Amino acid sequence: MRRCSIALALFAAAISTVLDRSALAQEKLTVWWTKGFYKSEDDALLAAVKKFEQQSGVSVDLSQYPVQDMIPKTVAALDAGTPPDVGFADVYDFQVTGKWAYEGKLGDLSDVLVPIKDKFAPNTIETTYLLNDKAKKRAYYAFPLKQQTMHIQYWIDMLATAGFKETDVPTTWKEYWAFWCDSVQPAYRRKTGTRAYGIGQPMGVDSSDSYYSFLTFVDAYNVRLVGDDGKLLLDAPNVKPGLTGALRDYTSIYTKGCTPPSSTSWKDPDNNVAFHNKTTVMTHNATISIVAKWLDDANNESLPAEQRAQARKNYAEAIRTAGFPKKPDGTPMVYRAAIKTAVVFDQARNKPRAKEFVRFLLQEENLTPYVEGALGRWFPVMTAAQERPFWQEDPHRKAVYDQFKAGTVTFEFTKNYKFTILNNENVWAKAMNRVVNEKVPVETAVDELLARIKTVVE
Amino acid sequence: MTTLALRQSARKPTARLSARQAWGFILLSPYLLVFLVFVAYPVVYGFWVARNPQSYVNLFHDPIFPRSVVNTLAFLVLGINLKMMVALLLSGFFVQARLWIRWLSLLFILPWAVPSIPTILSVRFMLNPEWGIINQTIFRLTGEDGPNWLNDPTLALMLAILVHIWKSLPFWTLILIAGRLAIPTELYEAAAVDGATKLQQFRYITWPSMQALYLTCTIISMIWTLGDFNSVYLLTGGGPADLTHVLATLGIRYLRLDAVDLSMAAIICALPLVLPLVFIMMKRLSR
């Protein structure tokens, strides 16, 4: 009898330990987040997470992965039924958010977002109001954190070495690209004897920069692929000629040898790297991460003073942030903005705490330091944060502010989620590679591109 | 014998295990557990994920899939045959008992002995068209840009095959050296006395003695190469434009495309290549 009592007591103790552990486990929040491009960006995230932990008493299990690994990892976790509670990747919005919402994989965040809806700038929160085919309803299945648009960055000192002034940079479309390719590159090579390239042109399939840049070229030709109602506009008379013009302009930079040969395999950080090590004089980039990295280095106490001084000089004097030239028709460029969306998964184990985290992060006093911690790489989605002095403090941030304030348009996938599939496949970079690698005529590559868009979307 | 057999078969089967059998099960159980968790479950799960016939329709409609099949076949046909032939030749060289050859063999074995990630990434860095050491040297010497090593699909695939050969050549050379060492030296001595040339010795002594081993090695190498993810993924990442993928790396591409079913279907499509090879292999080993 005594033995039996002891056994029962041990059993009860074991059960209560298990129960205790599961109770504790509920207080853990699993968060997956893209690794930042530099220290300050990650520090800002860690500070926000720490503050949330202190306020809520919840332990946050934060995992950070490089941008190109985020989708494969999340897809595998979703398939295994063990996604994180909260997930964010710089490329979720481009490639998966709309699709996951449609497939019912995301949690409804309307109760968090609707009360603060008015705080968001136009064309931001709207992009997270998505269709769930499983629940047959539209709701806020993601939350906007920050936004980005397309910029040009060039080395002022390299331009000077090539014998040009900034005022020499043309503002018209054809002349602008020809300037970097045909004038700056040969002149710089002659002067320095180095293998520098005029332009850093992202063309990799495993990269969001490649389609962001290419679609900006498409915008320059005034091509609209999808209407506001989500219907395809591929039969409009200007679509095929416009796409052909954009693809020809984009690929001719490669075929003329004005972008590094490896640009067909570039991932998102690679055009930054090529620019940093002065392999390219100019590059187009969908944030100002390039220049912000130098500011991060300048502020980094662990670096030697000399290196920090050089970084500050690069930030303040050697690099220019600018917009695109005028479109081929002579009108000013209208930039597309991408709203970076994070999600709470429907299979999240700790959905209430996940929503609490979202609610916390979207408070202005938490979101603003997180966004500004990236030193200008990301632009705020909330109106008040956009008007903070931070965005007027230096010429780079001012340029970003001006581009956004001139008005932006949204991506195709915000009108039809199937464009996330096209972006994920990167049909755009594939068309480029058909031209430059497989020597297919531009017109044929455009026909194939249009056929693929039709197949996926219709 | 007959009586004993009858007596044994007439014995009633008992539900209880003997102590010996129980111990057998206990000692086997860790292996069984590991087998079930890490082999049986993933395989069954893979089949379950790829159970929808539509996945295969989608897979065959993806232009990258046939390209990957062709690349895989190129890998098998070119890569393995070249590798095994070179290994056979080198085994003849390294089998010689000279001191400097012993030291050289130590260097030769290094690519196989060191981990794949640093070695293949080093090759990748060397081949970078802008700042890789090879193209930098070409530019310094000629003022011209070097080849676009990893961004030309054909060149990139050839280089992936080359890396695969470079990485696994030492292993197969070692195996074939062991095979050569098993051939009695008296046979060569007798042939030499009879005036046989080196080529004749190879044709009439070495090759007949090593034929079976060579074939077995080739089949094993084919099975392993079908699953070789590193040589392609670390060198080219499947690029440019997904044109250098092989069946072993295609799965990760579909994972990136949020298509787990296609990922599994691509792997299952490799089974018609793998299973006959495994079957032939098992038949050979059970002889």
Image: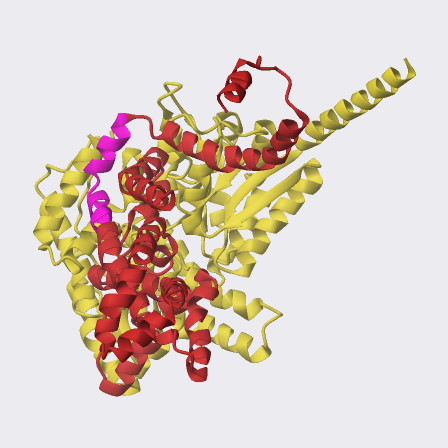
Chain colours: A yellow, B red
Q: Nearer the viewer, residue B254 or A219?
A: B254
For residue A217, say whether it is visible. yes
Counting from the top left corner in percent of width and height, residue A98 is at 36, 33
Q: Is residue A341 above or below residue A440?
A: above
Counting from the top left corner in percent of width and height, residue B211 is at 28, 58
Horizontal side of A57 relative to A439 (left or right) equals right
Where does the magenta region start and end? B53-70
* Residue B65 on the magenta segment: yes
Q: Is residue B73 above or below residue B268?
A: below
Task: Name the chief secondary structure element in magenta.
Answer: helix
Q: Is residue B180 above or below residue B273?
A: below
**Rendered residue at 22%/31% (across/down):** B57
Horizontal side of A247 relative to A5 (left or right) equals left
Counting from the top left corner in percent of width and height, residue A183 is at 20, 77
Which part of the image, by quadrant, shows the C terminus of chain B? Answer: top left
**Picture quadrant of residue B96:** bottom left
Q: Nearer the viewer, residue A122 or B210?
A: B210
**Rendered residue at 58%/68% (across/down):** A300
**Rendered residue at 41%/69% (across/down):** B122
**Picture quadrant of residue B30:** top right
Could you tell me how many numbered marks the image carries? 0
Residue furthest out toward the right: A2
Horizontal side of A110 relative to A406 (left or right) equals right
